[in-house]
Amino acid sequence: MPNPAMKLASRVSRIDASGIRRIFDLAKSLKDPINLSIGQPDFPVDDKVKEAAVSAIRADRNSYTQTQGIPELRDLSLAEEKAHTGRTYAPDEILVTSGVSGGLFLALLALVDDGDEVLIPDPYFVMYKHLVRLFGGTPVYIDTYASGFVPTPEAIEKAITPRTRLLLLNSPANPTGRIVPADVLQGIAKVCTKHGITVISDEIYRLFAYGPCPSISRWHEDTVTLVGHSKSYAMTGWRLGYACGHKDIIQAMTKVQQYSFVCAPSIAQYAALAGPQVDHTANIAAYRAKRDLMVGILSQAFELSPPDGAFYLFAKVPGGLSGQQFVEKAIANNCLIIPGGVFSERDSHIRICYTVPDAKLKAGAELLVRLARG
């Protein structure tokens, strides 16, 4: 029985349990479902990365590392940023984190004060609004449904108030798979520079892009860029990523990490040093083909904007049903998807993840079309 004297901190009441995790838990109760809900790569960790991890264990590299991460990985990540964005960061402008989720946690804790407003394009990754609320901030949603799930500079500027502190960008995005084009990013950068807005750019799906994938950090200096090794190398359980940005912000995040995560997992850090040896060309080509397969089938019954990257489709449910109602129909037919309301202030869509074998993917898409028509 609960202790009647127990009192939880009020901040806990500001957030809800993850709707994605509820679906994951439900998956355990179904027999061999068509599971289009899990947002992680389905290819294995590359043998080179596995061997690097094993070698690190055998070399007894099992202790804490520096809070900011091992120097070799920070140097490697700085080189990656230079290659991708053209920006040169100093050694004190990068922090190795426990995944992008860990980086997001640290960045928001370091930057958000009570009452600060954080602009969040809608749809959004489920964690964004809950962490903002947890740390005392106020999420302000920017509707992107009418603009093909790409936030516009005009909509962002319209939402800015004297209390606006941050803009959260995600490109390629979860749940839509859309990439914000360079010209749009330049427009957003001008707006944020004009109003003194810091951008947190979540680029966890950067590797999973089917075309150009620019970073707003190229045009907006006041950007905290978050990049993930966990998704890139299919080692989601190893929890590894990095953050880079102005040294004052990175040093504040490092200070918070000292009293929270302490450091990112040591073995994962050494394993990631093998990352440049991994060729993902075939994996990205496979996901592009899966996207094309799904778009070809689902377009028969669903309205959708084809993704430019990541491995998600965000499809509008036909027939006046809510996303939750359609998900219930799918679950009754042994298919797992996520209702759009988990990622949005409206519940008109569903998120479909296409990281499953092609035969099961095709069967799932055909089932969803039948349900939509039925």
Image: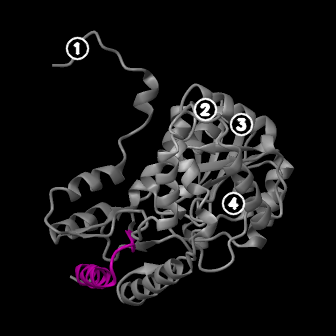
Q: Earlier in the sequence, mark 1 or mark 3?
A: 1
Q: Where does the magenta region start and end? A: 352-372
On residue 319, which mark appears? none
Q: Quadrant of the N terminus?
A: top left
Q: Earlier in the sequence, mark 2 or mark 3?
A: 3
CA distance for labels 2 and 4: 34 Å
**Which residue is at 43% across, 80% downward?**
303
**Which residue is at 52% across, 48% downward?**
56
Q: SS class of the residue under badge 1?
A: loop
Q: SS class of the residue under badge 3?
A: loop
The residue carrying pointer 2 sits among few (fewer than 14), some (14 to 19) or many (20 or more) residues within 10 Å by Cα, namely many
Residue 345 % position (x, y): 46, 54
72 left or right, relative to 363: right
CA distance for labels 4 and 3: 17 Å
CA distance for labels 2 and 3: 26 Å
Q: Earlier in the sequence, mark 1 or mark 2?
A: 1
Q: Amino acid at mark 4?
A: Ala
On residue 257, which mark appears? 2
Q: Earlier in the sequence, mark 2 or mark 4?
A: 4
Q: Which residue is mark 4?
A: 155
Q: Which residue is mark 3?
A: 163
Magenta span dominant secondary structure: helix
Within the magenta stretch, is there residue 269?
no
Q: Which residue is mark 1?
A: 3
240 left or right, relative to 226: left
Task: Tell me whether circle 1 and circle 3 mark residues in contact (CB < 8 Å).
Answer: no
The residue carrying pointer 1 sits among few (fewer than 14), some (14 to 19) or many (20 or more) residues within 10 Å by Cα, namely few
Of all residues shown, which one is farthest toward the front?
59
Q: Amino acid at mark 2?
A: Gln
